[in-house]
């Protein structure tokens, strides 16, 4: 499968758009906690349950092998941009 990072947006964490074949999935998140390696979170929506508790629901569910490839592609692009320090999208 052709997996290509389309655009990466940085703020306190990076937001990344990815093309999986002919499908674009927006807003993967790169999370970097102090003292830990960065990791990827899939896009999610939030809602409140009947008790008013905030809940999170993934927008896309990927097969495990595809998820690993996507995570690796995102983290590699994130590291390249961080090393370059230019903030430009990864082609």
Image: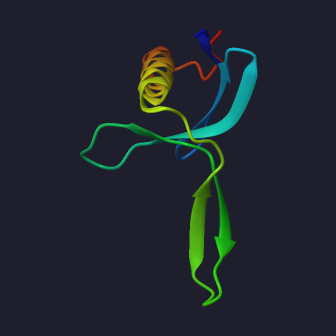
Total numbered badges shown on the rendered structure = 0
Q: Is residue 64 visible?
A: yes
Q: Quadrant of residue 46?
A: bottom right
Tell me residue 11's x, y (percent): 59, 43
How was this image coloured? rainbow
Q: Quadrant of residue 54?
A: bottom right
Q: Is residue 7 left or right of residue 72?
A: right
Q: Is residue 54 left or right of residue 66?
A: right
Residue at x 30%, y 49% (from the top left corner) = 34
As drawn, the residue found furthest toward the left would be 35
Residue at x 24%, y 46% (from the top left corner) = 35
As drawn, the residue found furthest toward the bottom would be 51
Tell me residue 5's x, y (percent): 62, 18
Residue at x 48%, y 19% (from the top left corner) = 73
Quarter of the figure with the C terminus: top right
Residue at x 45%, y 28% (from the top left corner) = 71
Q: Is residue 23 left or right of residue 44?
A: right
Q: Is residue 7 visible?
A: no
Residue nearer the viewer, 5 or 69: 69
Picture layout, residue 57 above or below residue 16: below
Tell me residue 68's x, y (percent): 41, 26
Tell me residue 38's x, y (percent): 37, 37
Q: Quadrant of residue 60?
A: top right
Residue nearer the viewer, 21 or 43: 21
Picture layout, residue 58 above or below residue 17: below
Quarter of the figure with the N terminus: top right
């Amino acid at each position: 499968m052709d997996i290509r990072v389309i655009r990466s947006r940085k703020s306190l964490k990076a937001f990344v758009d990815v093309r999986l074949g002919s499908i674009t999935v927006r807003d993967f998140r790169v999370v970097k906690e102090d003292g830990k390696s960065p990791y990827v979170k899939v896009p999610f929506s939030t809602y409140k349950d009947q008790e008013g508790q905030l809940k999170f629901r993934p927008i896309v569910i990927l097969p495990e092998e595809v998820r690993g490839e996507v995570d690796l592609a995102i983290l590699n692009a994130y590291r390249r941009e961080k090393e370059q320090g230019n903030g430009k999208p990864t082609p």
